[in-house]
Image (cartoon, grey):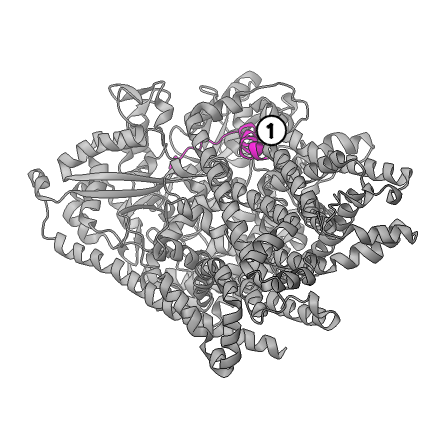
């Protein structure tokens, strides 16, 4: 099987080779080592990602396992219908896009600021300690986080209702029935969980900056703020760009755990917590048809793909080197 | 060749923050760190609370009654736990090492702007981030084409190449390695592999250390691969061993029909209480949290070494 | 952009090549897998062991049994003991393949999709039985039951096999257990005794108001009615027959004869119970976090602060809950609804034979043994006598080793009336069960299961609407007058009428064919 596929990969190349035969051969001769280096990853990607991609056709099929995936009957766009059946279609699209746009911004600004500030802490030990601790929430699964959030917000035993609000002389709040607060709670939880993760990436980028820039800046008497806006940020722009582009690709895919576990399936909150992934999951629980989830997945991919393409095009216009492809 | 050890921009005495600003930053981080630690402390506290008290009063930072029954319950079957630990450790170490090597090997060529196919292969890996065929076809490949069911390889292989990390590494290669260095090496007659191993890798330790850390976590935290590919409990990772129970609880919470039917049919569920669930969290992530500072020590070493320039 | 276009077309080409290669591969695979099964089924059929001595004529065969449940420490030991008995009787051995509930749906789906070779799979109407039959996962059992399932036919009430049919055919053998269903409450008898409350007059949910108000007043730390969903509008309590999956709208009343399908929101009983539950909630009888808590009623019982819960009833439900919660002797139950028999019970627990089984005959022989052979049945359900339990007549006592094999899956395998009884249970349990099974009202829809395929899109959209409103409404957490109309409107928009009409159409066709 492995052999077949590598052959398949090389046959796919033929058209290009024949059109520009000479130069392509030269390229191969010059960079043969690169192909050898990339081979393990290519093989893995083919098996782990590209071969299973034939499953995309499931989105257009009425699956019957006895007939196999290829043998099942075609169903046209029928599997997509349920996504647009109700007014929920608008709500889940809006929620998914708004939350994810918010997350992209939050996951950029805060971790970047944290990384820059951490870098200014004089004691290495302290900086390391903070960085380690900030990473802790990332270890927790969303299910556990949902327990913790419930520990704070529960009607009967939650801290806010049993301790904090009474202490402030305020009325109890039924948090899981109060829509208005969730557009803040969810980004808060998300940022809290992922802060350490993104900070580490930006830390690595900042550490890679040549010290000479800062030395020169000090000699010129540049303030810290100037150093940040003129040296640090411009120099790590490529990494900021790539992180943003990659997240834009996933803008139609919501973090299932966050939106499903944390609000505890409280129906009253659906207008502000229902996203594409949770909507699809609930349908799947009742209908149990992989065609329906496949259809949603394909739609998410196509939208993500289109958006990345557009943003990449914009990036390319501004600075060719920062573009993804 | 003068080696300057770079630690942070703050290490340059002339370029330090003013005292009040520095103090402010320190206070800020102390508060934020507390926000991150407190919930973990809560988890530990619940895990050593009395079960009845937790249901009656909810979570308490200082349990009204201490009780280590949850851990006694878990470690009744200590051999299974330790077996799963060893599987997790094995998978994590081998997986992280292999994936780092494979991803770096792929990221380097696509980081080279002079390589004409760089854009295509960037796209080739990026595409996998967006489109997927779904669980069933993916499973068919591993179970039928590759026949890896019930093997440790099935716990390692699917996570070896992550498009996200490959692209991050690529970007770091592009930004941190001066083209001039590569040029001069080439003029000296070094082959591509030599350049990669002798020049690129040493200069890229910060990003490699970061990705290694992330991959360690990915492997350690993974439970889904065990769920899908391993049929005999003896060979599951510790995360899945601990997470299984949560999944069972979730199943019943989300399938009211099933729950009612099972209840009516006479199925009894002996679910561990919340204290045991929290103890499971502690057992599942404990070792890696304790190992993390050690990791970090080496990472920081790597980071400083990485900044050595000639 | 030109650049990129070229890249994309290259990628597409590459993808297509891969797809071709793979489809060739997977095509082969499915053929390879499917053919031996057919062959075997054909060749094995003539070798029927009509008498016991024929066991030696059979080739040795390992039967795999896939069921949901937690893997047990002593599984190997029990398998060996079972193998000894099975080799003697049908020259087979057994491979127990328990799968945790949390992984069950995923794994069974993948197992079926990848056409993995297994023999017996647990299945149930509420666990996608009809869907999996539609997907070709199970074989039709009529002939096999006639041939090797004589014991099943003799011991099992015919209502079970009739009630578990899909399009007139059986794809699963139901477990022989309670046939009737009813709803009611389980409550703390020690508390009512202490407070001097007379429970003998409590017959309906409305009667509970007075009781709860006393409990609330005298025992303020207790939750009079603990619930996490459904309450009095649970289908088992309100006697709704959803004609299949209870998450798909459209029901008839099991305790009546009318065959008009309606969305439950249109049924008077639904509104009545909603208002009652809301009233109870407002009076503080119901736990405040009912709609969001994940503390199961079992756990809540353990904490000792629960006065009562709504439960599906059968004899000894109180004792069952009591022993699990450490409240033995303190609970009692009241049945509040008419006893009914519907598909949800008859097809609520079955063993099906996978269409990938290499020897369906032998699988059926095993199922037959589980229905007739006391020794094998109890061995599978409770482990080895003298090791996992000690026995005195029909009564079992737990030992130090019980925890190492106690799957708690007796309701899935064969004939529950063969089970021994734990010393914590009512010794007359099975006699009471048999009595309970008598004289139950049979639902007009017994044996009918709705096929949601034609209205898949509507059902998919409705699933979200239901999740949004149902739990909050049925636990009394929200205002009925305000939320119910909103709920109904959204259901309408999502196409509930179409689903109900389709249900009615299929149901009418079923009735006509009967």
Query: Relative to the observer, which residue lies in front, C149 or C9?
Result: C9
At x 49%, y 37%, the residue is B89
CA neighbours of label 1 inside 10 A, class few (<14), some (14 to 19), many (20+): many
* SS of the residue under disc 1: strand
At x 23%, y 43%, the residue is C63
At x 31%, y 45%, the residue is C350
Q: Taking B138 as reference, is C471 left or right?
A: right
Q: Taking C134 as reference, is B5 left or right?
A: right
Up the image or down, A237 lies above or below C15; here it is above
For residue A74, say whether it is visible.
Answer: no
Q: Quadrant of residue B29?
A: top right
* Predominant SS of the magenta segment: helix
Please give the chain letter of the residue carrying mark 1: C
Q: Provide residue B27's location: percent of width, then percent of height.
A: 83, 35
Asked if the stretch drawn in magenta spans residue A181, the answer is: no
Q: Taking A194 as reference, is B84 left or right?
A: left
Query: Relative to the observer, which residue lies in front, A196 or C422?
Result: A196
For residue A112, say whether it is visible.
Answer: yes
Q: Quadrant of residue B184?
A: bottom right
Q: Provide residue B237's location: percent of width, then percent of height.
A: 46, 38
Q: Taking B155 as reference, is A220 left or right?
A: right
Q: Residue furthest right?
A: A221
Up the image or down, B139 lies above or below B283; here it is below
Query: Relative to the observer, which residue lies in front, C291 or C98?
Result: C98
Q: Quadrant of the image for the N terminus of chain A?
A: bottom left
Q: Which residues are magenta?
A: B265-288
Residue indicated by mark 1: C223
């Amino acid at each position: 099987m492995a052999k077949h596929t590598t052959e398949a990969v090389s046959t796919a190349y033929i058209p290009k080779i024949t059109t520009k035969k000479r130069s392509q051969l030269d390229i191969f001769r010059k960079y043969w080592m690169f192909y050898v280096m990339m081979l393990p990853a290519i093989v893995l990607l083919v098996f782990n990602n590209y071969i299973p991609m034939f499953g995309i056709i499931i989105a257009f099929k009425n699956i019957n396992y006895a007939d196999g995936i290829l043998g099942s009957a075609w169903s046209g766009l029928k599997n997509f219908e349920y996504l647009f059946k109700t007014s929920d279609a608008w709500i889940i699209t809006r929620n998914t896009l708004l939350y994810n746009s918010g997350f992209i911004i939050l996951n950029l600004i805060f971790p970047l600021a944290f990384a820059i500030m951490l870098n200014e802490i004089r004691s290495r030990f302290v900086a390391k300690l903070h960085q380690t601790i900030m990473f802790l929430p990332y270890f927790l699964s969303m299910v556990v986080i949902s327990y913790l959030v419930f520990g704070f917000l529960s009607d009967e035993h939650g801290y806010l209702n049993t301790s904090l609000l009474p202490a402030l002389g305020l009325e109890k709040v039924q948090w899981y029935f109060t829509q208005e607060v969730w557009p803040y709670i969810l980004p808060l939880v998300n940022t809290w969980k992922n802060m350490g993760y993104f900070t580490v990436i930006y830390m690595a980028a900042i550490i890679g900056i040549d010290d000479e820039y800062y030395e020169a800046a000090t000699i010129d008497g540049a303030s810290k703020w100037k150093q940040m806006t003129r040296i640090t940020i411009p120099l790590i722009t490529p990494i900021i760009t790539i992180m943003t582009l990659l997240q834009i690709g996933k803008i139609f895919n919501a973090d299932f755990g966050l939106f499903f576990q944390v609000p505890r399936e409280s129906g009253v909150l659906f207008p502000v917590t229902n996203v594409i992934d949770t909507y699809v999951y609930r349908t799947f629980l009742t209908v149990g048809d992989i065609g329906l989830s496949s259809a949603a997945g394909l739609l998410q991919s196509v939208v993500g793909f289109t958006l990345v393409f557009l943003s990449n095009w914009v990036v390319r216009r501004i600075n060719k080197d920062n573009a993804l492809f | 060749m003068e080696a300057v050890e770079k630690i942070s921009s703050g290490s340059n005495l002339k370029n330090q923050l003013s005292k009040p600003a520095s103090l402010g930053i320190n206070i800020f981080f102390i508060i934020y760190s507390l926000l991150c630690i407190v919930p973990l402390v809560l988890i530990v506290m619940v895990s050593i609370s009395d079960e009845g008290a937790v249901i009656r009063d909810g979570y308490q930072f200082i349990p009204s009654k201490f009780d280590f029954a949850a851990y006694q319950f878990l470690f009744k079957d200590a051999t299974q736990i330790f077996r799963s630990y060893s599987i997790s450790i094995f998978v994590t170490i081998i997986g992280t090492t292999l994936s780092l090597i494979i991803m770096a090997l792929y990221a380097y060529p696509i980081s080279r702007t002079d390589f004409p196919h760089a854009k295509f292969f960037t796209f080739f890996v990026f595409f996998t981030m967006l489109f997927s065929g779904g669980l069933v076809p993916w499973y068919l490949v591993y179970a039928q084409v590759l026949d890896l069911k019930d093997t440790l390889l099935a716990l390692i292989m699917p996570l070896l190449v992550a498009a996200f990390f490959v692209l991050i590494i690529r970007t770091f290669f592009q930004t941190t390695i001066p083209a001039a260095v590569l040029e001069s090496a080439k003029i000296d007659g070094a082959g591509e592999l030599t350049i990669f191993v002798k020049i690129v890798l040493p200069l890229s330790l910060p990003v490699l250390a970061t990705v290694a850390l992330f991959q360690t976590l990915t492997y350690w935290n993974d439970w889904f691969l065990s769920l899908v590919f391993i049929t005999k409990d003896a060979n599951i990772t510790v995360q899945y061993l601990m997470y299984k129970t949560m999944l069972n609880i979730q199943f019943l919470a989300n399938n009211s029909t099933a729950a009612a039917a099972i209840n009516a049919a006479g199925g009894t569920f002996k679910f561990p209480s919340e204290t045991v669930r929290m103890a499971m969290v502690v057992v599942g992530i404990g070792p890696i949290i304790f190992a993390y500072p050690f990791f970090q020590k080496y990472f920081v070493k790597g980071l400083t070494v990485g900044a050595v320039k000639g | 952009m030109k650049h990129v276009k070229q890249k994309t077309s290259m990628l597409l080409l590459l993808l297509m090549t891969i797809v071709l290669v793979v489809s060739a591969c997977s095509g082969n695979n499915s053929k390879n897998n499917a053919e031996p099964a057919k062959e075997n089924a054909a060749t094995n059929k003539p070798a029927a062991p009509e008498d016991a001595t024929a066991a030696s004529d059979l080739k040795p065969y390992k039967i795999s049994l896939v069921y949901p449940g937690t893997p047990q420490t002593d599984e190997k030991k029990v398998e060996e003991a079972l193998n000894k008995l099975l080799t003697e009787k049908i020259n087979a051995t057994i491979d127990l393949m328990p799968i945790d509930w949390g992984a069950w749906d995923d794994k069974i789906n993948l197992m079926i999709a990848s056409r993995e070779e297994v023999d017996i799979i647990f299945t149930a109407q509420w666990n996608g039985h009809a869907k999996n039959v539609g997907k070709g996962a199970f074989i039709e059992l009529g002939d096999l039951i006639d041939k090797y399932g004589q014991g099943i036919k003799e011991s099992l009430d015919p209502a079970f096999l009739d009630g578990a049919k899909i399009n007139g055919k059986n794809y699963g053998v139901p477990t022989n257990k309670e046939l009737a269903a009813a709803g009611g409450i389980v409550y703390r008898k020690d508390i009512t005794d202490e407070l001097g409350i007379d429970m003998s007059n409590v017959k309906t949910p409305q009667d509970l108001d007075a009781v709860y108000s006393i409990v609330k007043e005298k025992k303020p730390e207790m939750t009079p009615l603990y619930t996490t969903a459904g309450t009095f509008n649970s289908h088992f309590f309100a006697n709704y027959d959803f004609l299949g999956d209870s998450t798909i709208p459209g029901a008839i009343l099991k305790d009546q004869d009318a065959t008009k399908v309606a969305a439950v929101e249109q049924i008077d009983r639904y509104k009545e119970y909603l208002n009652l539950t809301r009233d109870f909630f407002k009076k503080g009888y119901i736990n405040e976090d009912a709609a969001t808590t994940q503390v199961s009623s079992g756990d809540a019982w353990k904490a000792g602060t629960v006065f009562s819960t709504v439960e599906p009833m059968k004899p000894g439900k109180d004792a069952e809950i009591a022993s699990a919660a450490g409240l033995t002797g303190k609970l009692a139950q009241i049945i509040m609804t008419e006893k009914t028999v519907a598909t949800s019970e008859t097809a609520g627990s079955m063993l099906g034979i996978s269409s990938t089984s290499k020897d369906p005959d032998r699988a059926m022989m095993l199922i037959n043994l589980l229905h007739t052979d006391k020794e094998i049945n109890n061995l599978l359900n409770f482990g080895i006598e003298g090791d996992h339990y000690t026995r005195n007549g029909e009564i079992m006592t737990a030992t130090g080793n019980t925890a190492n094999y106690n799957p708690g899956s007796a309701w899935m395998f064969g004939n529950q009336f063969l089970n021994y009884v734990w010393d914590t249970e009512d010794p007359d349990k099975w006699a009471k069960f048999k009595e309970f099974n008598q004289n139950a009202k049979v639902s007009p829809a017994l044996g009918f299961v709705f096929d949601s395929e034609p209205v898949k899109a509507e059902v998919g959209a409705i699933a979200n609407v239901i999740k949004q409103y149902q739990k909050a409404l049925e636990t009394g957490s929200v205002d009925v007058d305000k939320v119910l109309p909103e709920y109904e409107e959204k259901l309408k928009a999502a196409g509930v009428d179409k689903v109900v009409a389709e249900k009615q159409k299929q149901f009418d066709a079923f009735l006509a064919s009967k």
